[in-house]
Image (tube, grey):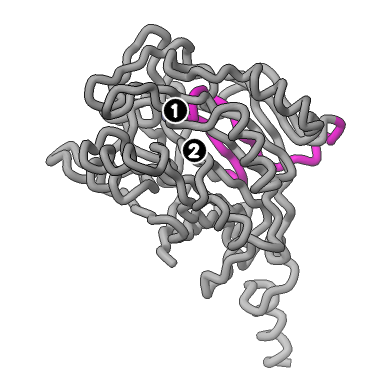
Amino acid sequence: MKQLTIDPAASGLPTRNHTGTKTFPEAKTTRVHPSNAKEEDTNATLYFIGTATTLLEWEGIRILTDPNFLHAGDHVHLGPGVSATRQTNPAIDIEELPRVDAVLLSHYHEDHFDRLAEDKLKRDLPIITTPHAHSCLTAKGEESFTSVHALDFFESLQMSFIHSAEQATSSKRPSIKVTGMPGKHVPPGPLAVANDILKAVPPTNGWMVELGYSDSSSQFENCYRIYISGDTLMIDELKEIPERYRGQNIDLMLIHLGGTTIPGPSMPLLMVTMDAKQGIQLMELINPDVTIPIHYDDYDVFMSPLNDFKKAVLEAGWSDKVVYLDRKDQFKFNVRQGKGGSAETSADSGLLGEQLGTQAVG
Ligand SMILES: [Zn+2]
């Protein structure tokens, strides 16, 4: 497994020209799950910025997903002859981001990594992404990003975070294990072959993001598991996910909906992200405790409105399994404290070491 060590104290603000002190954005509404859960029992936050852009905060660590900060009326290029117009504004501007420790980029498409991200993000900001996006982001000459980490399907990277002063008594570091999940932006068949030739729509990853703790030997203990679908269609390869995670709970699923429809290589209308119906199928397949739809109304090529999904959820009788976030809303949740999350008992903890030392002397 690939390893990456990050010191949040050294991460700093995420853009090159960031000024002032930026705090975690204030939410318009806070949601929890189930809806009667106590907000004070939560210790992690997912703030929805727009499109597939979210900001995750836990243990003082901040991860940004698919940075898209363009405004309503701005255009993106999605392939040869294919463009789209943004219909919404992001909850915050890129310059308003607080400190960010790493970026998770599902694929190199302009509604996920726009020209603002491309121009403004600090070159040494760690970015975890697909092998395709890695080759694009590191081939920009002097403008290349310098900390890009590629993950293929089912390949993992473990980010370990250097302790803050308050956490220094614990022997276990907060860690995030990220695993590439399969995804296909183009339906299998002749169009996929044409797409491979044209490179029109880039390959995409989903993610399994596991929040947990690791010890000095980098042994990872999961405490909360988040599956992010990425811009995929409902394809057979996704069936491998519940097989690989059999007996392991998926706590949260972020699903990229929208039913994005673009002219295909031979110009028929081609749906390249899940619509409401496929969203329901994915819920059935993954069976997470809670699902949050994202990537649902931000561009004019998103043809499947969120209301279609809401209706389908209602019909399936799953309303208590879905949380809806508007831009500027946040979801708060509880990451179970790992066995080593507190300074209790661990062979290599400083406290225990001292006690042993005392015993040896005595
Ligand atoms: Zn997209």
Q: Residue furthest top?
A: 73
Is residue 43 at least partly visible in the picture?
A: yes
Label 1 with label 2: CB-CB less than 8 Å: yes
Disc marking residue 210: none
Residue 152 location in percent, x, y? 38, 56
Residue range (magenta): 36-60
CA distance for labels 1 and 2: 8 Å
Q: Residue furthest right?
A: 36
What residue type is disc 2 on?
Leu
In which quadrant of the rendered image does the C terminus lie? bottom right
Q: Residue 10 in magenta?
A: no
Q: Quadrant of residue 116?
A: top left
Residue at numbered disc 2: 233
In which quadrant of the rendered image does the N terminus lie? bottom left
Give the mark nearest the N terminus, 1 or 2.
2
Ligand 1 resides in the quarter of the picture at top left
Residue at numbered disc 1: 271
Q: Nearer the viewer, residue 111 or 127?
A: 111
Q: Secondary structure at mark 2?
A: loop
Q: Nearer the viewer, residue 243 or 161?
A: 243
Q: Note whether 216 is above or below 152 in the view shown.
A: below
Residue 350 location in percent, x, y? 63, 72
At horizontal 38% and vertical 7% (from top left) the residue drawn is: 73
Q: Quadrant of residue 38?
A: top right
